[in-house]
């Protein structure tokens, strides 16, 4: 009996190191996440980028746990890009609004030129506002991206709301970014230093939109076909990303059919070959999101 008790105490001492407790590491959580990840990694229902990768699954689930998400919520809505959690701006705001210190978090103004959000945190003497303008986006070299061309008001709202969440609620949103913001730190991590604003100023104007029937072609769902159609015109080169996680997060974040088509066209511009690995890997997810948006239409 004493031997059994001593064995349990020794095991507890090994797993509850004072050093690990000091830095806040929960080894039980890591072990549980690892066990779940090993089982889930065998599922064919997972995104292709996560199949057979229990370590990546565990990172996503542990990150989601820290944000208050269940394992499946984390797998559905959370992506880890270059070591940082990426959520849609709406989900970031949702996490903040659930925080007991958030008295309110509201949109004050939204146009194609500017977006302003305001929030009041418990214990603060007055509310905090953050505004993002199209001039800031131009200066940062963002407006050349297809989603900024198609939906400037939505992109400004996303930037302003995510920035305000991180500024006022760092205990909730510190280090969390939305998919468009993820481009910025991917540039830095890859050493991209091209002055995109200047390059876009010299570039020719974008081609006129294609006919409506051609846009509809981009939405046809055929199991053996590629639903992501490229445009015929040669477009100016933008500094778009080459990571599967980035494009997956954009597909998941699309809230309308038009936004999804814009993502598809941007992906096709970046990867013109229909058999490109990223296009092949995301084809089913693109078609799935099409069906979801059509069902909600």
Image (cartoon, rainbow, N blue to C red):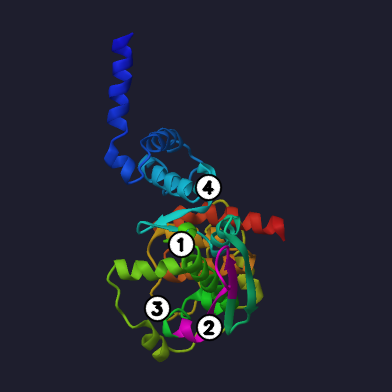
- Which numbered marker is on residue 69? 4
- Which label sits in the foreground, 3 or 1? 1
Measured in 3D between alpha carbons, the distance from the residue under mark 2 to the one under mark 1, in whole angstroms, is 23 Å
Q: Quadrant of residue 25?
A: top left
Question: Which residue range is magenta in the image?
Answer: 117-138
Front in this rendered view, residue 134 or 192: 134
- Could you say which quadrant of the image residue 27 lies in? top left
Q: CA distance from mark 4 to mark 1?
A: 17 Å
Residue density around tag 1, few if under 14, some if 14–19, many if 20 or more, within 10 Å: few
Label ID, residue 133: 2
Asked whether 153 falls inside the magenta stretch, the response is: no
Asked whether the beta carbons under mark 4 and mark 3 sit within 8 Å of each other, the answer is no
The residue positioned farthest toward the right in the image shown: 297
Residue 40, compared with residue 104, is above or below; it is above
Q: Nearer the viewer, residue 172 or 229?
A: 172
C-alpha separation, residue under disc 2 versus residue under disc 4:
32 Å
Choose mark 3 or mark 2, whichever is in front: 2
For the point 30% across and 73% down, which residue is it? 192
Q: Secondary structure at mark 2?
A: strand
**Pair 4/1: label in front:** 1
Percent coordinates x, y for residue 245 in the rendering: 43, 57
């Amino acid at each position: 009996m004493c031997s059994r008790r001593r064995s349990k105490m020794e095991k507890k001492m090994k797993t509850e190191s004072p050093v690990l407790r000091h830095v806040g590491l929960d080894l039980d959580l890591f072990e549980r996440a690892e066990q779940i990840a090993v089982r889930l990694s065998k599922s064919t229902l997972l995104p292709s980028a996560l199949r057979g990768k229990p370590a990546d699954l565990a990172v996503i689930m542990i990150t989601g746990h820290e944000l208050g998400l269940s394992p499946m919520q984390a797998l559905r809505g959370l992506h880890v890009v270059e070591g940082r959690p990426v959520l849609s701006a709406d989900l970031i705001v949702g996490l903040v609004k659930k925080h007991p210190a958030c008295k309110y978090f509201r949109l004050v103004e939204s146009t194609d030129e500017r977006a302003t959000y305001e929030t009041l945190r418990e214990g603060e003497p007055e509310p905090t506002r953050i505004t993002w303008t199209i001039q800031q986006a131009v200066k940062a070299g963002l407006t050349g991206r297809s989603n900024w061309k198609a939906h400037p008001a939505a992109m400004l709202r996303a930037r302003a709301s995510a920035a305000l969440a991180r500024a006022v609620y760092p205990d909730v949103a510190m280090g969390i970014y939305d998919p468009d913001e993820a481009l910025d730190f991917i540039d830095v991590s890859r050493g991209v230093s091209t002055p995109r604003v200047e390059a876009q100023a010299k570039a020719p104007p974008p081609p006129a939109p294609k006919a409506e029937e051609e846009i509809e072609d981009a939405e046809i769902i055929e199991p053996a076909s590629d639903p992501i159609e490229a445009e015929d015109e040669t477009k100016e080169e933008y500094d778009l990303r080459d990571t599967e996680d980035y494009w997956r997060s954009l597909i998941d974040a699309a809230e309308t059919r038009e936004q999804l088509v814009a993502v598809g066209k941007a992906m096709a511009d970046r990867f013109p070959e229909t058999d490109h690995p990223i296009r092949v890997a995301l084809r089913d997810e693109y078609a799935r999101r099409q069906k979801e948006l059509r069902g909600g239409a």
